Image (spheres, rainbow, N blue to C red):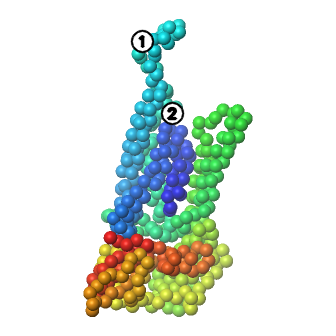
C-alpha cells in the first residue's frame, strides 16, 4: 500500500489500546508501520536497483524483529533527548534573594528544582511488541495488492500477492478519517464545556477503523475468488486458458479486471461480480504474444531484464524496432551499426480505474512500471530505463 495507509494503520494500532500500556506506543507503531519502505533508498542507485530491492529483505518476516528493535532504539534516543530538554526546562537555579523570601526549608544555595515527572512510564517490552505488530502490518497490507511481497526472501524469492486490494483505497481513508477526526472534534467539544481532558482518547474509533479494514479485506477476498470462479467457468477466450488473474479497482469490490493467457495470446475482460457479468471484446481486448527476436533474447539477459522477469508475473516483452523511449535518447553508434528498443511491461498494471483503457498510463500511453532496453546489433546492451528514469 502507499505510505499514508501504512502510517495511519500504525497510528490506529497504537491508539487501539497499546498506548495505555506504555508511553510512545503510538509513535513506535507509526514508525514501525512504514519503516520497511526505507528500501526505496536503493533508488539512489537507479530504477533497476530500486525494482530489484524494493519489497525485498526489509519486507520479510526475518526483518520484523530487526525493524522493531531499530524503532525502539530510535524512540530510546528520542526519549533521552526529550528528558534532557525537560530537565533543562525544570532545572531553575535558586538565587540568594529567593532564599530570603522562602520561609519553608529551602534547598541549599545553587541547587536545582526537581525535573517534571513523566506522565506515563515507558515499558520497553510492550513498546517492542507494539513495534513488531506494526511492522507485521506493513507486510500484510503490501501482500493484499497485486504488486506482491517476498516475505521469505532470500530463502524463498517467490513473490506472493493477494491481488484483492487496490494500492490506494479511498474507503480506508474514510475509516481513518473517522478514527482521528471524530475524537478530535469530541475533544474540542469537551474543552468548550470545561470537561476534564481524557488522557487516552479515540481507542474505540481506532478499533473501529482496524475492524473496518479487516471486514473490507474479507469482502474483497471473497469477491476476488468469485471473479476468478466466473472466469474459470465462462468461455471468455477462443483457446484453452493456461492461467488467469483478477486485478482490483478501488472503492468498488465488485469490479475486477481479468487477464487470461492462452498459447497464442492474452485476453482481458471486465468483470462485475454483483451481476455475474463479463465484458470482453476480442477485437479490443486481445493481445497477441509478441515474437521472440535476437534483441528480445539479449534484453532478457540485461540487468533490467533479469529483475523485471523475476518480478513481472505477467510480463510481456516486445521488440519495438527503432522507437525512442521517453526516458532516454537513442544510443550513439558508429555507421553500420543498428539499434533496437525492447519494451518490458506487466499486464497486471495495464488497466485503468476510471473506465477508459490507458488512462492510468503516463503521457506516452505506457504504464509507469514499463521498462526499456536499447539493444545494439541484436546483442549489446546500450542503455536501460524504467518508468521515466534512466539507469545510469
| Relative height, residue 377 to residue 381 (above, below) | below
Most foreground residue, 265 or 223: 265
Q: Residue at x 42, y 40 (%)?
A: 78
Q: Quadrant of the C terminus?
A: bottom left
Most foreground residue, 91 or 188: 91
Q: Residue at x 54, y 67 (%)?
A: 166
| Relative height, residue 229 to residue 266 (above, below) | above
What count of labels does the image hold? Answer: 2
Q: Residues within 10 Å of mark 1 (few under 14, many from 20)?
A: few
Residue that numbered label 1 is attached to: 108
Residue that numbered label 2 is attached to: 120
Q: Can residue 240 be seen here?
A: no
Quarter-wise, where is residue 88 in the image? Answer: top left
Residue 37 screen position, x and y as percent: 42, 58
Please, what secondary structure does the residue beneath circle 2 have?
A: loop
Label annotation for residue 320: none
| Relative height, residue 175 to residue 18 (above, below) | below
Quarter-wise, where is residue 255 in the image? Answer: bottom right
Please, what secondary structure does the residue beneath circle 1 have?
A: loop
Residue 222 screen position, x and y as percent: 58, 68
Quarter-wise, where is residue 96 in the image? Answer: top left
Residue 103 screen position, x and y as percent: 53, 7
Residue 343 screen position, x and y as percent: 40, 82
Q: Residue at x 33, y 81 (%)?
A: 331
Q: Earlier in the sequence, mark 2 or mark 1?
A: 1
Amino acid at each position: 500500500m502507499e505510505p499514508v495507509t501504512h502510517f495511519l494503520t500504525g497510528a490506529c494500532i497504537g491508539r487501539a489500546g497499546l498506548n495505555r500500556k506504555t508511553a510512545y506506543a503510538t509513535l513506535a507503531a507509526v514508525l514501525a508501520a512504514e519503516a520497511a519502505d526505507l528500501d526505496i533508498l536503493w533508488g539512489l542507485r537507479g530504477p533497476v536497483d530500486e525494482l530489484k530491492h524494493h519489497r525485498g529483505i526489509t519486507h520479510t518476516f526475518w526483518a520484523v524483529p530487526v525493524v522493531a528493535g531499530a524503532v525502539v532504539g530510535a524512540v530510546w534516543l528520542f526519549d533521552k533527548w526529550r528528558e534532557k530538554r525537560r530537565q533543562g526546562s525544570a532545572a531553575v537555579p535558586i538565587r540568594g534573594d529567593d532564599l530570603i523570601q522562602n520561609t519553608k526549608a529551602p534547598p541549599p544555595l545553587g541547587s536545582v528544582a526537581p525535573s517534571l515527572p513523566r506522565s506515563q512510564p515507558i515499558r520497553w517490552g510492550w513498546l517492542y511488541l507494539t513495534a513488531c505488530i506494526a511492522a507485521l502490518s506493513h507486510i500484510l497490507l503490501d501482500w493484499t495488492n497485486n504488486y506482491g511481497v517476498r516475505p521469505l526472501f532470500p530463502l524463498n524469492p517467490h513473490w506472493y500477492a493477494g491481488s484483492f486490494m487496490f494500492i490506494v483505497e479511498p474507503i480506508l481513508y474514510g475509516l481513518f478519517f473517522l478514527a482521528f477526526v471524530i475524537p478530535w472534534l469530541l475533544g474540542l467539544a469537551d474543552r468548550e464545556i470545561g470537561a476534564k481532558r481524557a488522557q487516552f482518547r479515540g481507542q474505540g474509533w481506532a478499533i473501529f477503523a482496524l475492524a473496518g479494514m479487516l471486514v473490507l479485506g474479507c469482502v474483497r477476498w471473497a469477491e476476488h475468488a468469485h471473479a476468478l470462479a466466473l472466469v474459470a467457468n465462462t468461455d471468455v477466450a477462443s483457446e484453452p486458458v493456461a492461467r488467469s488473474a483478477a486485478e482490483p479497482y478501488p472503492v468498488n469490490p465488485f469490479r475486477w479486471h481479468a487477464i487470461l493467457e492462452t498459447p497464442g495470446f492474452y485476453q482481458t475482460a471486465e468483470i462485475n461480480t454483483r451481476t455475474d457479468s463479463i465484458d470482453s471484446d476480442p477485437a479490443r481486448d486481445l493481445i497477441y504474444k509478441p515474437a521472440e527476436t535476437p534483441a528480445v533474447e539479449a534484453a532478457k539477459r540485461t540487468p533490467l531484464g533479469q529483475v523485471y522477469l523475476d518480478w513481472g508475473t505477467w510480463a510481456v516483452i516486445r521488440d519495438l524496432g527503432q522507437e525512442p523511449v521517453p526516458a532516454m535518447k537513442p544510443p550513439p553508434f558508429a555507421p553500420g551499426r543498428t539499434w533496437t528498443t525492447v519494451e518490458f511491461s506487466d499486464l497486471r498494471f495495464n488497466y485503468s480505474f476510471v473506465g477508459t483503457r490507458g488512462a492510468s498510463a503516463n503521457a506516452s500511453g505506457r504504464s509507469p512500471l514499463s521498462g526499456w532496453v536499447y539493444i545494439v546489433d541484436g546483442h549489446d546492451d546500450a542503455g536501460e530505463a524504467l518508468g521515466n528514469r534512466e539507469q545510469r
